[in-house]
């Protein structure tokens, strides 16, 4: 999977190039365009209960789309619902906590769940729950406004 981000820092667009039989999972409504050989599978990630929980408590959409390239390489373009920026991070058997509404897409190997954020996140206007992404692979994040990348441990996790 190759990700190219254009038009930063506002109205950003992610161009994702997929190899044959490679997949990407994206939030419902994030797809702008796709090549003709991409197959779409729409599901309630984590079943009905998990999807409803993520929707009500985490502010995420009920449905998740998985796009798979069939019969050759494919391309999909993704954009956030609000004008802003897109950043890509690569997880290596790690866990990343994401603010509500900031998840755009990832490889299907990334597991998405909710994590109680507590009063700190609630009073910080981030909501009571955070989206927990864990596993290995790229994750596309979005924000309302520009993304300022700051490595927390001295090395940059961004790809």
Image (cartoon, rainbow, N blue to C red):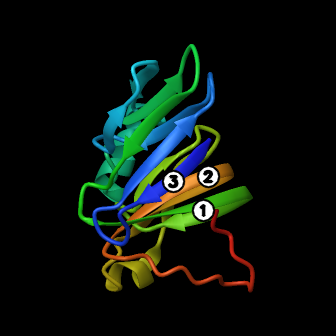
Give 95 or 53, whichever is nearer the viewer: 95
Q: Is residue 108 above or below residue 114?
A: above
* Residue 123 picture location, percent across and down: 33, 85
Q: Residue 35 lies in what quarter of the image?
A: top left
Q: Secondary structure at mark 2?
A: strand
Taking the image as shown, residue 8 lies to the left or right of residue 11, namely right
* Residue 137 picture location, percent across and down: 67, 49
Extreme residue in the left direction: 82
Q: Residue 64 lies in what quarter of the image?
A: top left
In this rendering, the label closer to the viewer, 3 or 1: 3
Q: For the residue carrying disc 2, how many other residues have a C-alpha within 10 Å: few (<14), some (14-19), or many (20+)?
A: many
Q: Which residue is mark 3?
A: 4
Q: Which residue is mark 2?
A: 138
Q: Are marks 1 and 2 in contact (CB under 8 Å)?
A: yes
In this rendering, the label closer to the viewer, 2 or 3: 3
Residue drawn 36% across the image and 72% down it: 9
Extreme residue in the front direction: 7
Taking the image as shown, residue 55 lies to the left or right of residue 119, namely left
- Label placed on residue 89: 1
Q: Are marks 3 and 1 in contact (CB under 8 Å)?
A: no
From mark 2 to mark 3, how far is it between C-alphas? 12 Å
Question: Between disc 3 and disc 1, whose residue precedes?
Answer: 3
Question: Between disc 1 and disc 2, whose residue precedes?
Answer: 1
Quadrant location, the C terminus: bottom right
- Residue 62 visible, this orientation: no
Question: Between disc 2 and disc 3, whose residue precedes?
Answer: 3
Residue drawn 32% across the image and 49% down it: 55
Quadrant location, the N terminus: top right
Q: Secondary structure at mark 1?
A: strand
């Amino acid at each position: 999977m190759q990700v190219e981000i254009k038009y930063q820092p506002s109205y950003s667009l992610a161009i994702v190039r997929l190899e044959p039989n490679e997949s990407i999972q994206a939030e419902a409504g994030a797809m702008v365009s796709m090549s003709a050989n991409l197959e779409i599978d729409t599901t309630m990630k984590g079943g009905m209960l998990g999807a409803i929980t993520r929707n009500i408590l985490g502010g995420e959409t009920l449905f998740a789309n998985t796009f798979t390239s069939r019969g050759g390489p494919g391309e999909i373009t993704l954009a956030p619902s609000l004008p802003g920026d897109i950043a890509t991070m690569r997880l290596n058997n790690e866990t990343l906590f994401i603010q509500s509404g900031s998840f755009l897409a990832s490889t299907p190997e990334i597991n998405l769940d909710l994590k109680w954020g507590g009063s700190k996140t609630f009073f910080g206007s981030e909501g009571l729950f955070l989206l927990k992404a864990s596993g290995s692979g790229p994750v596309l994040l979005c924000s309302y406004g520009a993304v300022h990348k700051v490595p927390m441990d001295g090395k940059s996790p961004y790809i």
